[in-house]
Amino acid sequence: MTERALAQDSNTKPFLAVLSGHRQAVPPIWMMRQAGRYLPEYRELRAKAGGFLDLCFTPEFAAEVTLQPIRRFAFDAAIIFSDILVIPYALGRSVRFEAGEGPRLDPLDTPDKVATLSRDADMTKLEPVFEALRRVKRELDSKTALIGFCGAPWTVATYMVAGQGTPDQAPARMMAYRHPDAFAKIIDAIVDNSIRYLLGQLQAGADALQIFDTWAGVLPPREFARWSIEPTKRIVAGVRSQIPDAKIIGFPRGAGALLPSYIEATGVDAVSIDWTTEPSLIRDKVQNRVAVQGNLDPLALIAGGAALDRAVDDVLTNFAGGRLIFNLGHGIQPETPIPHVEQMIRRVRGNGART
């Protein structure tokens, strides 16, 4: 998306207005993983597609899945259906999704193995993502924003080193301690190619971008600065060197008290926060400088009823006085009842719901 188009769209899209510095009386709302297994229409298409990567890399399917929650709930933003591990895939790594076990890759757990890593991704492998974005863009109304995304280098690297998800990301943390130069080569490859990937998404129609650093919270402060903040800063700078007004949300999950230094260094327009974050810290040291996105506990959404109403009200009380994009503190869980999502939306929008 061009700089002029971004400026024009911020006037009509509540989500972009918040990112551009304008508080909304009714916070815009979307959910991380809003296209997912809690929706019967998703499960039906997922079965038809076959493998998970087939769903991601078939533009017709990926576009349809992206649009499903928009049709059902009229969220203020759609997020393209894809996965953070498409960058390793484009770098020539084997990426497999095994039922009930999650992603599997060939581990890059020694310096010798890291030496085999390509520095340049084959962007033609990601063309289906760009085509899905173009398809979704044509279908969205003038008030609904379209979000592109990538995984942050640290989080993507944790999967590349271990070959799978692990509880505390110990394999990547150990490699970063023992072989920092080799680990930096993985990070550098992810940074450079994520910039290209995000620029491609903006050019294909994305209105804004999110950088997901799901495992940032396992890092101590010194390592957080080196492996989470610095690579994200480079991605933001690389994207803005080509599209200066690109709107970018960072999500260093679990960063807590390190969030002020994260926003200062990276230059993101907004930060997504998880449900454990201390509200006064966010109001005093984060939301006074950037927009905040979050931070409903996904389990409160499963619980529903009075517990959900209280949790929604807490988010609004804590953050709606400033620039807020209402979201969850992480992705929606597959067992979430659809009526509870509807309850949350009614509670957030109240009498200000848009039609």
Image (cartoon, rainbow, N blue to C red):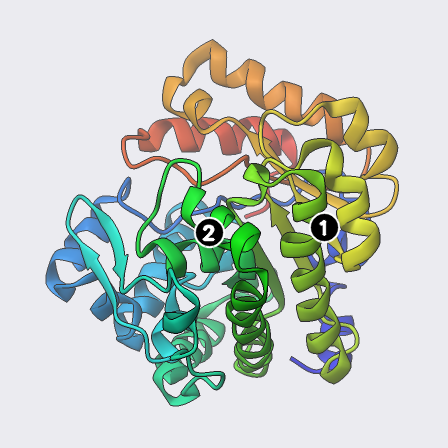
Q: Residues within 10 Å of mark 1 (few under 14, many from 20)?
A: some
- Residue 290 located left or right of residue 32: right
Residue at 79% from the left image edge and 77% from the top image edge: 244
The amino acid type found where label 1 is placed reads Ala
Q: Amino acid at mark 2?
A: Ala
Image quarter for residue 192? Answer: bottom right
Q: Residues within 10 Å of mark 2 (few under 14, many from 20)?
A: many
Q: Earlier in the sequence, mark 1 or mark 2?
A: 2
Say which mark, if any, is on residue 225: 1
Q: Is residue 260 above or below residue 263?
A: above
Rendering coords of residue 158 (x, y %): 44, 53
Residue 284, by quadrant, is: top right
Residue visible at 32% across and 30% down in the picture: 336
Q: Residue at x 84, y 51 (%)?
A: 264
In this view of the protein, can residue 21 be seen by the observer? Answer: no
Q: Which residue is mark 2?
A: 172
Asked if disc 1 and disc 2 are in contact, CB closer than 8 Å, the reply is no
Q: Secondary structure at mark 2?
A: helix
